[in-house]
Amino acid sequence: MAFGVNRAETYLRKGAWGDVVRVSGIECVGEVDFDRSGALRTGQRVAAIMGGLGRTRNGSYAEYTVVPSTNIFTLETKLPWDELAAIPESYATAWVCLFENLKLAKGQILVVRGGTSALGQAALNIAADAGATVLASTRSELKSTLLKTLGAGAVLIEDASLSEAVRKLYPNGVNAVLDLVGNTVLRDSLRMLKKGGRLCQAGFLGGPKPVEFNPIFDMPSGSDLSFFGSFVPGTHDYPLSDIPMQCIVESAAKGTYKAKPAKVFPFECLPDAHRLMEANQANGKIVVVM
């Protein structure tokens, strides 16, 4: 019925991640047409993420797709399809990054680097609601108001030495950094951490080009660095049952999470959705409806 557009799909389209299937799309929401196991009833409302979609099996840029049972959320909700489609991949990824990789707890200080992205906005919503103090970065001061409405206690303008601005606010460092800009700023992001702090890299808004990295000089002693790839939900180590998607959807329906899509396109305008994504002008989740 609808699907979110993700930056990964622009890389898949360009062939930047090797040979992939012809039909792209790594997530969707819709109704079950047929489940040969009988576990899901015809017409049941579901969301699907990953499980090889768009990479090794034809994905969601179509009227029908076939998804592994391990990669299905069953949902009870009256949210319209376009609003529901803005949630699954971004909020599932944010949830795992925050509570598994970063082990975020109430009262801790978190920096979301790349806060205006769809994943960054989801992380802001979730972390602020969980009682964390959240700092968010953006390249445009005009987006500060948006980030504050999502839960950011402070908004910082993105640059290569953002750690200096963070250290002015918190001289002893912060507990956690969710870095969505990626390799280009990784070393600077690590300089934000206090002893025992954690950094999770989960995006490449600055591009995936490798950079030189030396743990001896670039990692503060006592800090933890991890990576989360959104292609792993539904695997043995990252079962979807660990992600409370029904509760997330209910929080979105109540307005606790401000998760509505930033822009909705009809399917025939899908190329325009990709152009908007690559122009970095979406300011949130892009959704396509069938």
Image (tube, rainbow, N blue to C red):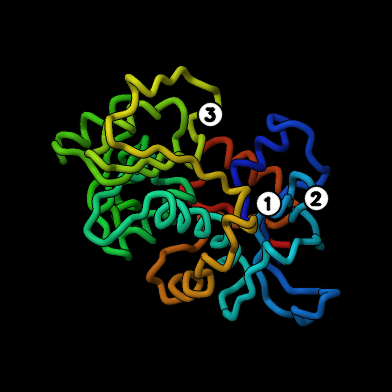
Q: Residue at x 74, y 56 (%)?
A: 60
Quadrant of the drawing holding the C terminus? bottom right
Is the residue under label 2 in contact with that under label 1 (CB below 8 Å)? no
Categorize mark 2 by other alpha carbons within 10 Å: few (<14), some (14-19), many (20+).
many
- The amino acid beneath tag 2 is Arg
Can residue 54 be seen here? The reply is yes
Categorize mark 3 by other alpha carbons within 10 Å: few (<14), some (14-19), many (20+).
few
Residue under label 2: 57
Is the residue under label 3 in contact with that under label 2 (CB below 8 Å)? no
Image-quadrant location for residue 156: top left
Q: Position of residue 151 (x, y in %)?
A: 30, 58
Which is in the foreground here, disc 2 or disc 3?
2
Q: Position of residue 9 (x, y in %)?
A: 66, 42
- Determine the secondary structure under disc 1: loop
- The amino acid beneath tag 1 is Ile
Residue under label 1: 26
- Determine the secondary structure under disc 2: loop
The CA distance from mark 3 to mark 1 is 19 Å
- Determine the secondary structure under disc 3: loop
Badge number at residue 49: none
Q: Foreground: 42 or 215?
A: 215
Q: Residue at x 39, y 28 (%)?
A: 185
The CA distance from mark 2 to mark 3 is 25 Å
Badge number at residue 207: 3
Q: Earlier in the sequence, mark 3 or mark 1?
A: 1
- The amino acid beneath tag 3 is Gly
